[in-house]
Amino acid sequence: MADCISKVETTTRLVQLRVDSLGTGCYRRSDPFKIGLWNWHILIEKKASLIVRLYPEHCRKEPSPIATFTVRILVRGSDGQRVESKGLIVSDKLLRSSSDDFMWPLEYSVAYGRFLVEIEFHDLKVASSHSGDPHSIWTGEEYLQSRAEVGIARCLSRMLEEGLHTDVTICSATGCVGAHRAILAARSPVFDSMFSHNLMEKQSATVRINDMCLESCRALLSFLYGNLKYPDFRKHRVALVRAAHKYDIVDLKEACESSLVDDIDGSNVLVRLHDAWLYQLKDLKRECLRYLLEFGKVHDLRNEFDAFLQDVDKDLVVELVQEQIKLLKIHGL
């Protein structure tokens, strides 16, 4: 039967979901509730058995949690008092956005009629950005650091969006936007050099980026300030990888390259290969060559490929020929 959303009651670490009735073949899904850094759902199903599931909502900003918790089914006894009918302790369980990561089947008789599902979180961990080892989000130095980083991110976002005390103007091909020299210099050695020497950019407090539109330029600044939204990143990633190469922004360049590798197909492979050559994107170049040569897609793009060879740098043509010869030798042709 169709999913029915059920409200939950929460404290800092305790969650209760009330189920008044649940027929065979039905399920109940809770409203999202916030515990730690994540929004969560509880899903109750009645199939061959009663099944309790717990999972966080998908979020690109936060890593998947490693949870330690107790889950209980509470029913009312003959005296009207709540009693624990069944309980389960779960330790250091990695929970992603899939509802299959935690699944607890019970017999029907455990929860006949009205019952409560109670989950008490004892700890939530994420992998450390420094050592890779899991650390609790609720205790210790890492938690303090994470909260400080959240506050800094909010401040930087406000500085950019509200133009607080800007001291440099970025002029794109279609408009201008204010920024802060210190942040640009800290994120890019090229910007740092501009403002450290007696160059035009330092004297005029203006940086001209004539090969980007204003919208792409804002996306670039949003990344440098740490608040670029993923849809904007996807929309402007080609312009961003060009800027990342030009201004030596290594982390942005890596992010763009990884994203461009993810969706190579026949409609974009030749453009991607050319960009990989121009901006020294080794992984992207390798995957484009594999797509064209190892998978034989160059034959499907014969006309486009011929036109491509007429326009690109001759060194790239030589490399393509060398890769083709290498492939023929591997296959003994």
Image: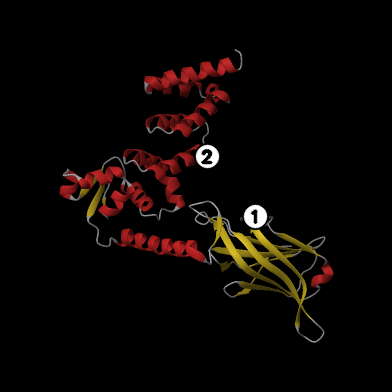
Q: CA distance from mark 1 to mark 2?
A: 21 Å
Q: Residue at x 22, y 47 (%)?
A: 195
In the visual, does 60 lie left or right of 21? Answer: left
Is 150 in front, or is 53?
A: 150
Q: Position of residue 114 (x, y in %)?
A: 76, 76
**Quarter placement of the C terminus:** top right
Are dots 1 and 2 in contact, CB under 8 Å?
Answer: no
Disc 1 marks which amino acid?
Ser
Task: For label 1, count other residues whose C-alpha is less than 10 Å away and answer few (under 14), some (14-19) or many (20+).
Answer: few
Q: Which mark is residue 251?
A: none
The one of 226 and 70 positioned closer to us in this rendering = 70
- Direction top: furthest residue: 333
Q: Residue at x 60, y 71 (%)?
A: 13
* Quadrant in which the N terminus is drawn: bottom right
At 36% from the left and 51% from the top, the residue drawn is 224
Q: Secondary structure at mark 2?
A: helix
Q: Nearer the viewer, residue 205 or 150?
A: 150
Residue 297 in view: yes
Q: Quadrant of residue 46?
A: bottom right
Judged from the image, the secondary structure of the residue bearing numbered disc 1 is loop
Query: From what the image shows, is residue 166 above or below residue 79?
Result: above
- Left or right: 242, with 296 as reference point: left
Please give the residue where the numbered disc 1 appears in the rendered image: 98
Q: Which residue is mark 2?
A: 262
Q: Amino acid at mark 2?
A: Asp
Q: So how many labels did they put on this image?
A: 2
